[in-house]
Amino acid sequence: MSKFGKHDFTGKTVVLTGAGGVLVSTFSEAFAQLGANVALLDLNREAAQSVADKINQNNPNQAKAYECNVLEKESLKAVNEQIKADFGPCDILINGAGGNNPKATTDNEFHSEDLDKEVKSFFNLEETGIEFVFNLNFLGTLLPTQVFAKEMIGRPGANIINISSMNALTPLTKIPAYSGAKAAISNLTQWLAVHFSKVGIRCNAIAPGFLVSKQNIDLLFEADHETLSPRGEKIINNTPMGRFGKAEELVGGILFLADETAASFVNGVIIAIDGGFSAYSGV
Ligand code: NAD
């Protein structure tokens, strides 16, 4: 039995966006080990290709990398045609591309009247940064769903999984655009679950707690990447399990939601996988 349990995705085509990244590459490996053909979409072709190469070493011909921008419908449509030719239509869509950007992040947690001029406050955030983050997360989930879900209709077990965040429940300081965009992802997840409920496509999400990755390492650690930053320390103090999570620890939730037998009546939920962060008031 695979270390990921008894799920069986043999013959399924799983399309994963952001597949060159930390989390989705881990999900991709798990799906391939459980029999799926995995279509790895990423803006960064090299990153997706190296994930595909690694998967194909153990599961020959089960992974293929596709360069694709989740913000360009034509790019998504062209890739959909290639995937259909390579593996057949999409059965399971994992909308994993997303993230924050420094341009949409304030330097300060709280506003005060005596801020240094150099501080990037809420009032200095530029529309372009806000727009970039909002679009990447929200439109970057909506557009792939428009392109892939059409042909998922009528396919047994078809489902979509989005990636929300702790920010969707209570916004974190400094990152208003990312927080708002992830709240919108949770909302869209419920909307899609209802919208597609009569045509057999389930839609759910996971809301990961705090994991260390490229996009947040500079927020969680000092420059040495070993000493916790004051923010990293606060997070650990508010995570009852007292540690950051690992990408592998999200896999069980993803596979459960994707499994048409285990989760056949699960629709419109956002599963927090967070070491207890969202359950803890801090007291
Ligand atoms: P990552 O930065 O490691 O990977 C993101 C991938 O998306 C990258 O490979 C990047 O090239 C790709 N990408 C960026 N823009 C794209 C575009 N326009 N089109 C196609 N691909 C694009 O991030 P990650 O940590 O693996 O995060 C994956 C998802 O999980 C994101 O939605 C993120 O917001 C969410 N998330 C992450 C954490 C965490 O702690 N890592 C926590 C909560 C939620």
Image: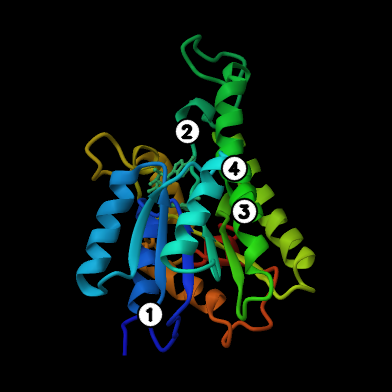
Q: Distance between the residues labelled 2 and 4?
A: 22 Å
- The residue at which mark 2 appears reads as 101
What residue sits right under mark 4 in the picture?
73
Of pointers 1 and 3, the one earlier in the residue sequence: 1
Q: How far apart are marks 4 and 1 (CA)?
A: 29 Å
Residue type, label 1: Gly
Q: In the image, what residue type sits under mark 2?
A: Asn
**Which residue does the image show at 49% across and 41% down from the upper left?**
69
Residue farthest along the front direction in this orientation: 85
Which circle's residue, 3 or 4, is located before the other in the chain? Answer: 4
- Mark 3 — residue? 147
Mark 1 or mark 2: whose residue is earlier in sequence: 1
> In the figure, 58 relative to 182: above or below?
below
Callout 4 secondary element: helix
First along the sequence among labels 3 and 2: 2
Residue at 56% in and 75% down: 257
CA separation in Å, label 1 and label 3: 24 Å
The answer to the question of whether label 3 and label 4 lie on touching residues, with beta carbons closer than 8 A, is: yes
For the residue pair 34 and 138, the one nearer the viewer reads as: 34
Q: Nearer the viewer, mark 3 or mark 2?
A: 3
Q: Where residue 17 sits in the image (x, y, percent)?
A: 47, 53
Residue 33, position as x, y percentages in the image: 33, 77
**Image x and y of residue 80, in percent:** 52, 55
Q: Mark 1 points at which residue?
A: 35
Q: Residue at x 44, y 55 (%)?
A: 210
* 10 Å crowding of disc 1: few (<14), some (14-19), many (20+): some
